[in-house]
Image: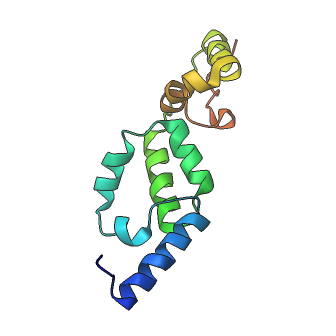
Amino acid sequence: MNQLPKEDEEEFSSTNKRQKRSHNCPNDAFFAILPDDVIDIVFCFTSFPTLCRVKAVCSSKWWLQSVDRCILARLGKKKFKNKTELVEAVGKYYWDKRNHSEELATTYGWPIGKWDVSEVTD
């Protein structure tokens, strides 16, 4: 069986320990060589709830910045036009957030406290 050189073995071992400590987040050294736009493309295939979960468990500064950048790029900024539209969205958020989080986040933003209700007058 092939053995790693001592310095590679130590790096591999410390990388594995780091990944376990940070809940199996990808290694910065591996992903840091990729341009930001490539990371953004990869993340565009990841659901919004998954990105939020990933952000919560990763301790790497680079990884958190990458996830934050992707989340911010996907958040919607649509203003609610009336109370009916707002009530419908709140209902989706409250009763079935799991199935509607992607739609709500990309339309109105996330979390619910960031929604723009400035045009609702009724």
Q: Work out whether 81 lies above or below 75.
A: above
Tell me if 98 is positioned left or right of 33 in this view. right
In the foreground, 1 or 20: 1
Residue depicted at 49% across the width and 46% down the height = 72
Which residue is most to the bottom?
6
Q: Is residue 121 visible?
A: yes
Q: What colour scheme governs how the chains and residues are painted in the rendered image of this protein?
A: rainbow
Residue depicted at 60% across the width and 13% down the height = 85
Q: Work out whether 50 lies above or below 118.
A: below
Residue depicted at 62% across the width and 52% down the height = 56
Q: How many marks?
A: 0
Q: Work out whether 41 lies above or below 94.
A: below
Residue depicted at 47% across the width and 67% down the height = 62
Quadrant where the image shows the N terminus: bottom left
In the foreground, 93 or 16: 16
Q: Quadrant of residue 31?
A: bottom left
Q: Work out whether 23 lies above or below 3.
A: above
Residue 78 at x, y percent in the picture: 50, 28
Residue 98 at x, y percent in the picture: 60, 26
In the foreground, 24 or 5: 5
Q: Is residue 120 visible?
A: no
Residue 106 at x, y percent in the picture: 48, 31
Residue 122 at x, y percent in the picture: 70, 11
Tell me if 60 is positioned left or right of 33 in this view. right
Q: Quadrant of residue 5?
A: bottom left
Tell me if 77 is positioned left or right of 97 in this view. left
